[in-house]
């Protein structure tokens, strides 16, 4: 398909590149082939199908660097009892919920937030999935849901020993099967929408032998691991008690960390842990809303960025939309440190530069920039700047205007997946109704399962 988007203002998100006004951008198949003044681009590509942007802002789609689609059915659920700490929240909500998800629940849990993601301008997601009694084929069901709206993703299954050796082995096998499937698809089409990682829950639910197997699987497939790391202080306590090693030390010892591995949260780190993470070249993802919701603490984003760690931003299942976490990140660190001057540049770097860089490092796909040769993942936003907009002040416009604006059109891999705020072939009310039928069944089991 050849598409020419014209009558737009373009934020390219390429270092040193200015905002383009009265501009146009040309897409051939899944790749951006040109951008520049409207007149030039139209002259150069007269036969391309036109899409009139009506003066809107065209910018790269957002990348959510850590998500749990399966958390959808927790929305409104009645938790029995009163969790006193993070371990209770896992026991009383998340581990109870994931155990009763079947493959239909996995599908609808992913489809509903995938629709929201596209509507809110998220075009790539790195997801972490758990359904311990429906492991085999679960990542195919997540993929099937995302492909209905054309959302790009890196998926993984959360391996854990918390439900026994059989389920742990099934989790490893699911990661292996899915990764091989994606690699086969990418060998013929490198821009295939789906890829995988080796998913792991967290150090405190993983035995040494499982870490060994996961590292060996990741290494044999030239992939990385995606693991929750020091989200709560209990992770460290348990590691010291059972293995006489700290979590970072343990993960490094078993070769779980590395340039393609994502250590999520990394809140309870000492200075040596931060050095260790940086030396291993690992990726770290910060999830401020989730951390505040669970009252587990705050990641030292400054200490990690200063050490050159590739640090990104995710939502950890709090929302498929990244913008609430972007705003929270901007406020949380200022508020906690009682310093209004911090976090502005850091969060901007994490969202605009690092999240696309993380996605590229784990999948090999270049997203998050509007430039020739990049993948055509972009959004047209109902944003008409009321003050001068430049590449230098874009972040101010983003935080206080664009984040509130509606996304009109979403394009992923050169395909229009939403236009005029409508996702073709998706009846949202019908899908929500079907999801409710499945959710009711899941909730009944949740209540019975004391
Ligand atoms: Zn998570």
Image (spheres, rainbow, N blue to C red):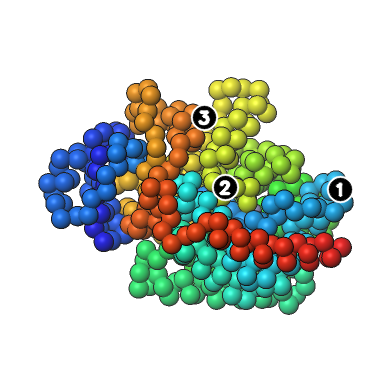
Q: Earlier in the sequence, mark 3 or mark 1?
A: 1
Q: Secondary structure at mark 1?
A: loop
- Residue displayed at 47% across by 60% down: 426
Give yes or no for contact between labels 3 and 1 (Cβ–Cβ under 8 Å). Answer: no
| Closer mark to the observer between disc 2 and disc 1 | 1
| Camera sees residue 166 | yes
- Rendering coords of residue 234 (x, y %): 79, 50
Residue 218 image offset from top left, x and y in percent: 56, 68
Residue 140: numbered disc: none
For label 3, the residue is 344
Tags 3 and 2 in contact by the CB under 8 Å rule? no
Distance of mark 2 from mark 1, alpha carbons?
27 Å
Q: Secondary structure at mark 2?
A: loop
Mark 2 burial class by Cα count in 10 Å: few <14, some 14-19, many 20+: many
Per the model, the C-alpha gap separating discs 3 and 1 is 37 Å
**In which quadrant of the rendered image does the N terminus lie?**
bottom left
In this figure, which residue is indicated by the disc labeled 1?
A: 82
Q: Is residue 25 above or below residue 252?
A: above
Q: Which residue is at the front of the view, 164 or 308?
A: 164
**Residue with the mark numbered 2:** 314
Q: Is residue 25 left or right of residue 125?
A: left
Which residue corresponds to the image point at 82% horizontal and 46% vertical from the top-left?
A: 85
Choose the circle earlier in sequence order: 2 or 1: 1
State whether residue 19 is above or below residue 184.
Answer: above
* Crowd band around label 1 with a 10 angstrom C-alpha radius: few (<14), some (14–19), many (20+): few
Residues at badges 2 and 1 in contact (C-beta under 8 Å)? no
């Amino acid at each position: 398909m050849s598409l020419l988007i014209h009558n737009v203002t373009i934020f390219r998100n390429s270092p040193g590149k200015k905002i383009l006004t009265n501009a146009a951008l040309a897409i051939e198949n899944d790749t951006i082939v040109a951008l520049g003044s409207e007149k030039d681009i139209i002259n150069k590509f007269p036969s391309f199908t036109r899409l009139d942007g009506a003066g809107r802002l065209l910018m790269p789609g957002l990348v959510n660097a850590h998500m749990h689609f399966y958390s959808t059915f927790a929305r409104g659920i009645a938790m029995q009892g009163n969790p006193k700490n993070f371990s209770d929240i896992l026991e009383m909500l998340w581990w109870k919920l994931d155990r009763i998800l079947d493959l239909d629940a996995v599908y609808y849990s992913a489809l509903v937030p995938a629709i929201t993601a596209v509507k809110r301008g998220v075009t790539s997601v790195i997801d972490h999935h758990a359904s311990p009694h429906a492991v085999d084929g679960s990542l195919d069901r997540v993929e099937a849901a995302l492909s209905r709206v054309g959302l790009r993703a890196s998926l993984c299954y959360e391996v854990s020993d918390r439900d026994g050796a059989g389920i742990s082995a099934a989790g490893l096998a699911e990661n292996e099967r899915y990764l091989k499937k994606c690699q086969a698809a990418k060998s013929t089409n490198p821009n295939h929408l789906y890829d995988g990682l080796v998913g792991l829950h967290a150090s405190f639910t993983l035995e040494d032998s499982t870490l060994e197997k996961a590292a060996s699987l990741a290494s044999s497939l030239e992939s990385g691991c995606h693991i929750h790391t020091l989200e709560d202080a209990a992770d460290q306590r348990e590691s010291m008690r059972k293995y006489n090693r700290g979590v970072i030390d343990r993960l490094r010892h078993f070769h779980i960390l590395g340039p393609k591995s994502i250590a999520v949260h990394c809140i309870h780190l000492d200075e040596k842990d931060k050095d260790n993470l940086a030396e291993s070249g690992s990726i770290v993802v910060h999830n401020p809303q989730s951390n505040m919701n669970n009252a587990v603490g705050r990641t030292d984003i400054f200490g990690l960025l200063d050490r050159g760690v590739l640090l990104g931003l995710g939502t950890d299942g709090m929302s498929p939309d990244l913008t609430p976490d972007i705003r929270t990140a901007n406020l949380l660190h200022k508020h906690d440190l009682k310093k209004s001057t911090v976090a502005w540049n850091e969060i901007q770097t994490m969202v605009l530069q690092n999240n696309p860089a993380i996605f590229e490092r784990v999948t090999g796909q270049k997203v998050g920039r509007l430039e020739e040769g990049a993948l055509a993942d972009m959004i047209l936003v109902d944003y008409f700047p009321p003050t001068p907009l430049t590449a230098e002040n874009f972040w101010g416009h983003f935080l206080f205007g664009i984040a509130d604006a509606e996304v009109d059109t979403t394009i992923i891999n050169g395909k229009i997946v939403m236009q005029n705020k409508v996702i073709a072939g998706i009846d949202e009310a019908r899908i929500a109704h079907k999801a409710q039928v499945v959710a009711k069944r899941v909730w009944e089991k949740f209540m019975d399962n004391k």
